[in-house]
Amino acid sequence: MTPSDPLFQTNKAVLAARLKAILPAHCLLIDEEDLRPYECDGLTAYRELPMAVCLPENEAQVVEVLRTCHHLGVPVVARGAGTGLSGGAMPHAQGLVLSLARLNKILRVDRAARLAVVQPGVRNLAVSEAAAPFGLYYAPDPSSQIACTLGGNVAENSGGVHCLKYGLTVHNVLRIRVVSIEGDILEIGSEAPDAPGYDLLALLIGSEGMLGVVTEVTLKLVPKPELAQVVMASFNEVGKAGDAVAAIIAAGIIPAGLEMMDKAATAAVEPYVKAGYDLNAAAILLCESDGTPEEVAEEISRVTEVLTATGASGIKVSQSEAERVRFWAGRKAAFPAVGRITPDYYCMDGTIPRRRLAEMLAAITAMEDKYKLRCANVFHAGDGNLHPLIMYDAAKPGEWARAEAFGAEILELSVALGGSITGEHGVGIEKINQMCVQYKTPELETFHRIKAAFDETGLLNPGKAVPSLHRCAEYGRMHVHHGETKFPELERF
Amino acid sequence: MQLDELVQRITVAYDNRTLLRIRGAGSKDFYGSMLAGELLEVADYRGVVAYEPSELYITARCGTPIGEIEALLSERGQMLAFEPPRFSGATVGGCIAAGLSGPRRQQAGAVRDFVLGVKLIDGTGQVLDFGGQVMKNVAGYDVSRLIAGSMGTLGVIAEVTVKVLPQAVAEQTLCFALNEGEAISRLNQWGGQPLPISASFWHDGQLWLRLSGARAAVEAASRKLGGSVAVDAQKHWNFVREQTHPAFASPQLWRLAVPSNAPSLNLDGLQAFEWGGALRWYAGDLENVREEAARIGGHAVLYRAPESQRCRVGAFAPLSPALLALHQRLKKTFDPKGILNPGRLYAEF
């Protein structure tokens, strides 16, 4: 996607020779056929072949690789499991991919302190599995949790279906060890509730591999609730479902999870998972309650009252753990289920104030006609995070371009409605243009200066997450709204 | 007061390299290393800009008193879950800048966990907007949370948006007679169980434990835990939150943040602890307090002391050379001439 970058001119032979000197042969890939699997992450529409892939087995090797790249001026793209959906781990043509997949050990699960110390290549779900014997678990649960790794979760500030109550990655990480591009090791945060100085943990979490490479993560573990139950409610109008979400929150309830799926999404999921969804409903809501049995009973009855009052056409409460898991299985499988009914799909990640939901969904319906593409909607309704899945066929000329334009319009509408272009997937390469819509020049300049404070030569994940001002000027030129030009202070070219 | 006036003051200060000392209600003048610079009073830039109970956020200008915000939230059954100290008229700007959280921190999270967005005036007088009003937003670096606890050294918080939560339906406080070691060990055992514990405070052989949540959950936990039900509990937690409890009375007070299950420290002068054992308060002229805190993986803040002492030993634990250099580069990013609250966090900037 990115044309060869004039900023970086890497001599592959020199790079390969230097890497061979510091890494064992099985930790280095340089042949094209070996590099091919790394050309994209979960966002397959954007691809690039790197010059090399390094798979270090310990922190010392990570340090050596980064020092070498710093010395040679070679771009570095860190990568976990490659499940990201914004192209954050898409390689740089003049650079190398630093895969942390082999740093995959759980170093410590501390029952008394309720924390786990893990390497970045450990899978999200593996932490909860390791903590389960102690009645503890790691709360953030992105849908890709069986595959995605903690290093990637830190880079993206991943969420999941339970983050309304339990928070995002930033709320559940206590400490990280980070290697700078110069190869210096920094300890950020601690096992205490806070650390001296600036909250660098907050700055680094979600920084998309732009500021440093994580080699160790300390996670907060929380007690597993005694019981969880989920209420499934059907609505014959999407707007009513949106109102029900607001009404639950307004009633003083913070459910453990609050998710919505529209008819297109349930229709895709039901034949695949057989979750028992109401296929006649315009939208369904899944509302989970967890805690002590007494607490759950009390909350479920309050939720049921609110859902009835807001016009739910049907309500089902899970009667067993198996049934609860089945209700969720459909939601968690929504992406692959949509993948079964269309050759390709493009997943968006805007967030909006909950009260604007019906408006947003109506706009998306209109966009389906405009771009002649179908769209299924799954929605972390509790925290306003929408995942429209735009269906297209990459083999048909023009479809990807239409899907991309469709997605861009959704994101820009998210900003206009008072939200954000990304709730949990990150900006990566995908939403780089929409960053120009969400932020003005002074904020973007501040982001660039923050980047330079960590990585002066700009070698970590170049071209991602924060657009250059020139790129924004170019994008602004193409998208003039109401005759107002953004970035008026920049020369046009 | 208008935003323009604040911007103007900072722009002029930037041009003239005038050092500024940002001040809201001044309720935390005692906190931090050094107070230096011309006073920049921001208390008059006040008022709630937006409050959406069903969206769980409130946006307010920096000079808005915490008490005023909480009164508004209370009308809709909501609260600031991090329970910041209100002291005498503390403002929301100062609350975010100082980053001090109260009794509910262990259960609900710290100030930074609730910051959703800031409007910041940087050290050159530029107005910057970071974050927003939605719960999830990963576009760009998370500058809003970085600002929490930065002691005004990165910019003047003109406006802030924080997440709010519903008040608990029921609360009950239990008391237990336990020595320090027993209390720490008990709290950590309970911490690993699904119990609705929302605050803990130990002082002089007595542990107070607050339960919050659904009525049935509080009642069930209360039966399970035993102890005696405290009377006047709300008053007690208010003393703790406002630090008017006798445990905080010493003119020389150290705040130690440590791993919650760290055993008794090798220090004299323990006054109290909170947050399940993770926040411990010591009084006196303690020699090895920073080393001792560091030994168990924590850090010590000289929380309250004569200014001369705070300047001499620094209010906050020193940073490693690599981290200090990074702090200085970040400081320059926001405040290139170093005019905002110089020395309040560290003498080096």
Image: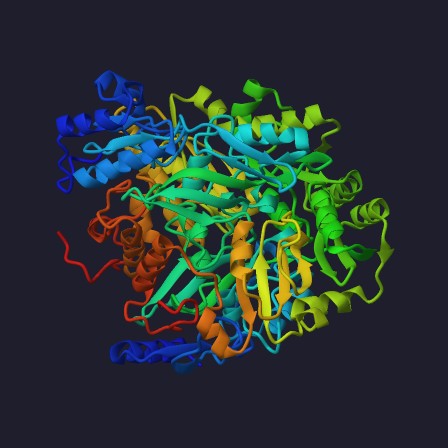
The quarter of the rendered structure image containing the N terminus of chain B is: bottom left
Q: Residue furthest top?
A: A33
* Quarter assignment of residue A298: top right
Position of residue B242 measured from the top left corner of the image (x, y, whole percent): 66, 71
Of residue B229 and residue A45, the one placed in the foreground of this image is B229
Position of residue A179 measured from the top left corner of the image (x, y, whole percent): 35, 42
Residue A89's place in the image compared with A412, above or below, is above
Q: Residue at (32%, 67%) from the top-left corner? A: B335
Of residue A377 and residue A66, the one placed in the foreground of this image is A66
Q: Residue furthest bottom?
A: B38
Residue A45's place in the image compared with A458, above or below, is above
The quarter of the rendered structure image containing the C terminus of chain B is: bottom left
Residue A216's place in the image compared with B173, above or below, is above
A367 vs A306, left or right, is left
Can residue A284 be seen here? no
Position of residue B121 measured from the top left corner of the image (x, y, whole percent): 37, 69
Of residue A384 and residue B117, the one placed in the foreground of this image is B117
Q: Residue at (37%, 78%) from the top-left corner? A: B20
Q: Residue at (37%, 73%) from the top-left corner? A: B340
Position of residue A84 measured from the top left corner of the image (x, y, whole percent): 40, 33
